[in-house]
Image (tube, rainbow, N blue to C red):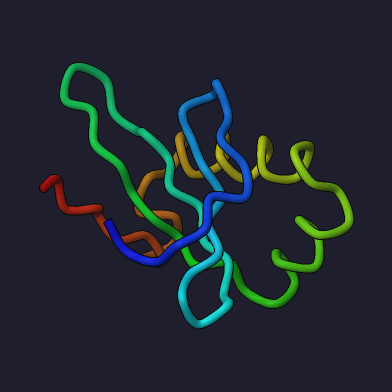
Amino acid sequence: MSDEEVLLLSPLLYRVLREQDGALSIEVVVGGIMQFEVRVRLNAEETESFQREGRAFSDRLAQAITADPPFGGRSVKVSQG
């Protein structure tokens, strides 16, 4: 695995990571029968909201990504393996 730091691991099937360059991202398990993970790098506003609200913000963000996995073209599928 890479040098990412897991900041939050949620039972709602997501985790918030600090990437090697210091940026925050969220990985969310999405899908129905075929489940996979997508990653979205947080923008400055989202990073500020996470720092201010913590789990409450990341829960809302994860739910929004689950409802719309492409997330406006911002998500990337996480490779398995």
Q: Residue furthest bottom?
A: 21
Q: Residue furthest left?
A: 81
The quarter of the displayed image where residue 45 is located: bottom right
Indicate the quadrant containing the N terminus: top left, top right, bottom left or bottom right: bottom left
Instruction: Answer left or right for 50 relative to 28.
Output: right
> Which residue appears farthest toward the top when viewing the image?
33
Percent position of residue 79, x then y: 16, 53
Extreme right residue here? 52
**Residue 40's spot in the image, x, y percent?**
45, 60
Question: Is residue 54 positioned above or below 25 on the image?
Answer: above
- Looking at the rendering, which quadrant does residue 61 occupy? top right
Residue 7's x, y, as percent? Answer: 62, 50
Q: Residue at x 46, y 28 (%)?
A: 13
Instruction: Identify which residue is drawn at 58% across, 29% down.
Output: 10
Compared across the picture, whether 63 is left or right of 74 comes to right
Residue 31 in the image: state x and y as whole percent. Answer: 29, 28
Question: Which residue is pictured at 24% across the width and 36% down the height?
Answer: 36
9 left or right of 13? Answer: right
- The one nearer the camera, 73 or 7, is 7
